[in-house]
Image (cartoon, helix red, strand yellow):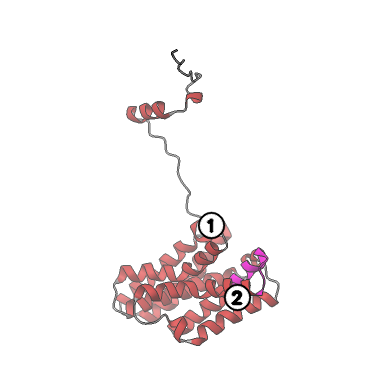
Amino acid sequence: MTRYLDLAGVCSCALLGGAVARTAGLDLFGFLVVGIISGLGGGMIRDVLLQHGTPVALTDYAYLAVAFAGAAVAFLIQVSEQSWTRLFTALDAAVIGFWAVAGANKTLAVGLGWLPAILLGTLTAVGGGALRDVILGRVPAVFGGNGLYATVALLVAAVTVLCAYLGIPEVGIGLGIALALVFRLTAVHYGWNLPSGLDLQPHSQLASLMRRRFRPASRRGGKSHSRKEEP
């Protein structure tokens, strides 16, 4: 089950990587590289951190073949990044569930605890997209304005781990994917995002003193006068 969930995520993210490559105007080689990194990046980071044998993408040739196929389809069929967002949001939401569930279950299977399982489940879901954006010189979409992408992955991984500890891992798989679909689609529909940096202004006497001390001269209402040089 974990293998098939992994492969479903690889295919979808390779397609999305190809759509991003088209938006960036890359050639065929660029399509393949971006598609493979997008499709395989999160799982390979997870497997390297687990240190439990060679990453599965290098031992199971189906992974690389599926990533190639996804990138090739995006190269042949014109699907822009904007079209992907509109048309394939449901598939994208399902992929978050696939990979968060697969990453959490694989981490538990090698004997690690609940916290590493949640962290690596989240990393599996968002790692490939973050690597893709970095090599294209973009701020990773997972860092904001992307409909609670990482938050959904974190929640799905946590639910999966909880169900595994309760002895009902099969329920965790179905519940995690369903939760990803509902939560992600709702967040995209209503434009939910985490808040960006706040601008709190403390009003204590110490804070006021510090603001006056470090305020630029131009904002203190006076001109800065240079000291005359003595002869």
The tag earlier along the polypeptide, 1 or 2, is 2
Q: At label 1, which amino acid type do we have?
A: Val
| Residue 160 painted magenta | no
Question: Is disc 2 surrounded by few (<14), some (14 to 19) or many (20+) residues within 10 Å?
Answer: many
Expressed as whole percent of the image width and height from the top left, the position of residue 210 reads: 37, 29
Q: Quadrant of the N terminus?
A: bottom left
Expressed as whole percent of the image width and height from the top left, the position of residue 80 reads: 67, 67
Q: Which mark is residue 139?
A: 1
Q: Which of 221 and 166 is in front in this view?
A: 221
Q: In this view, does 113 lie to the left or right of 156?
A: left
171, above or below 134, in the image: below
Determine the secondary structure under disc 1. Answer: loop
| Residue 20 painted magenta | yes
Expressed as whole percent of the image width and height from the top left, the position of residue 152 reads: 46, 65
Determine the secondary structure under disc 2. Answer: helix
Q: Give the range drawn in magenta.
A: 16-28
Q: Which mark is residue 36?
A: none
Which residue in the structure is indicated by mark 2?
32
Q: Is residue 103 left or right of residue 88?
A: left
For the question of whether residue 158 can be seen, the reply is: no
Q: In which quarter of the image is residue 45?
A: bottom left
Q: Are marks 1 and 2 in contact (CB under 8 Å)?
A: no
